[in-house]
Amino acid sequence: MAEKDLKKLIEKALDMRNSSYAPYSHYRVGAALEAASGQIFTGCNVENSSYGAANCAERTAFFKAVSEGVHDFRRIVITGGADDGELQYASPCGICRQVMREFCDPATFEIILAKSTEDYKTYTLEQLLPESFGPENLL
Ligand code: THU
């Protein structure tokens, strides 16, 4: 995949931080999920005054895609950090990793933690969620 496309995906994830609704944690997360077709689904974290009702950026992106009938994915870029601080390599929470596991091949799906278009780290889902439980277990 062209480097230019990855930079575009990172820019979309960074841009999504502007939509983050995080009045409680002040930690803004943006995600950009690329489908196998090349279509991009974005997401941000959406918090709630009843804290447990918050939704992470990654799951927002996945649920947008799945609700549009898309189930095949190539990679996701995640960008996160306090709204008055520097960006971190924002690693996905356990629930988001498990949601990815439902739809993605652990060996090939890429999770890209980006601070900028130049500064990012790439993992496979298998690296971040080893020995996982998935749909095949129930077949
Ligand atoms: N958050 C995400 O959006 N993705 C993650 O994988 C980790 C955490 C959000 C949830 C909450 O709104 C804020 O970051 C602080 O936990």
Image (cartoon, rainbow, N blue to C red):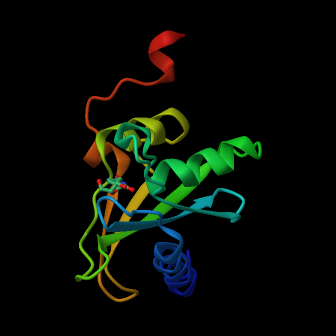
Residue 83 location, x and y as percent?
32, 77
Residue 7 location, x and y as percent?
50, 84
Q: Please state which of residues 16 and 128 is positioned toward the viewer in this rendering.
A: 16
Q: Please state which of residues 73 and 28 is positioned toward the viewer in this rendering.
A: 28
Residue at x 54%, y 10% (from the top left corner): 139
Q: Please state which of residues 78 and 132 is positioned toward the viewer in this rendering.
A: 78
Tell whether 132 sits left or right of 17. Answer: left
Q: Is residue 40 above or below residue 17?
A: above
Residue 26 location, x and y as percent?
31, 67
Q: Is residue 89 above or below residue 57?
A: below
Q: Residue farthest to the top?
A: 139
Q: Residue farthest to the front?
A: 49
| Quarter, ligand 1 | bottom left
Tell whether 54 sits left or right of 37. Answer: left
Tell whether 55 sits left or right of 62. Answer: left
Q: Is residue 32 above or below residue 55?
A: below
Residue at x 39%, y 40% (from the top left corner): 50
